[in-house]
Image (spheres, helix red, strand yellow):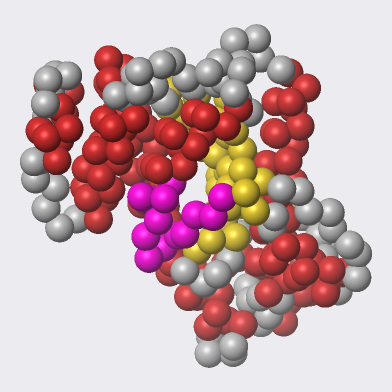
Amino acid sequence: MFMGIGNENALQRVAALDCGDHKFNQFMKYSLIDFTINSMRITPIPANDERTMYVEYIVPILILKSTSMIEFRCERKDKESASSIFFVTQEKSSTTLLDGIGVNNKKFPCMVIESSGLKVTTDINHLLEDSIKNVKSATDALKNIMCRFPNASINTVKLANVYSIHIIQTKMTLFKYSLKDETFKAIECSSALIPCSFEERIYLTSVYDLFAYLYKDLSNQVKIFEKLEAEQLGLTEVADEEMICFTNGLLPQ
């Protein structure tokens, strides 16, 4: 329906769309309103400005996507994971400033976000630094889960996911990280082009597809963390040989 709306009175027509009571439909409507307002800017987005596109087009979507399952915070360090890792390993883990962090309903960092800018000529070194930062921060967040639930089953921890979003120019890519035996695995889940003008609004289809995947996956993660808590507290019995503290070489026993 939105794709058929023209420039004339676009904001009023988007605001009049019926989204019902479903949270994801509401997210779509409110982000469409924000996108339509941003599309009214009279000058193009500065190509060499790393922050303008991120602040105007990405941050509003992330804030609107904040639900009972996840809360987004901008310009943060993941001190929570670093503290948990240090407590268990007595090894200091470096923390770097991230463009954004997503925290789940259990207050665990579960998503890291980096935007590498809109430069016409891509800065490869900067891209590599941001990519490494995402991988390091995501795996640290997984270690945080392991440190906080040492008595939980290793099989349950393998079901816990941490996500990363990397924005390169106008492309946004979603990755999912999880534990695999004594290492980590990363899966590229989805990618989308970010529309920066009203004429490019058709690209919103793939943006919403990416967030629909994330919404569904996060819904499943709520149950996983509830299971981890039950196992850690002894409400669900876990054999010693299955506990994280006795089975995984990523953390000291």
Residue 21 to residue 131: above or below? below
Instruction: Work out which quarter of the rendered image holds the N terminus and state it.
Output: top left
Q: Position of residue 144 (x, y in %)?
A: 70, 65
Residue 100 to residue 108: above or below? above
Drawn side of residue 4 relative to residue 194, left or right = left
Residue 63 to residue 230: above or below? above
Q: Position of residue 33 (x, y in %)?
A: 24, 38
Instruction: Work out which quarter of the rendered image holds the C terminus and state it.
Output: bottom right
Drawn side of residue 88 relative to residue 159, left or right = right
Please, which residue is most extreme toward the top here?
A: 121
Quarter-of-image position of residue 203? top left
Q: Position of residue 205 (x, y in %)?
A: 29, 28
Residue depicted at 77% across the width and 69% down the height: 83
Please, which residue is most extreme toward the right here?
A: 91
Q: Is residue 179 visible?
A: no
Q: What's the magenta region?
A: 62-74
Q: Position of residue 209 (x, y in %)?
A: 33, 35
- Residue 69 covered by magenta stretch: yes
Residue depicted at 34% across the width and 43% down the height: 212
Viewer-proximal residue, 82 or 251? 82
Residue depicted at 52% across the width and 29% down the height: 52
Residue depicted at 28% across the width and 32% down the height: 37
Residue 131 to residue 46: above or below? below
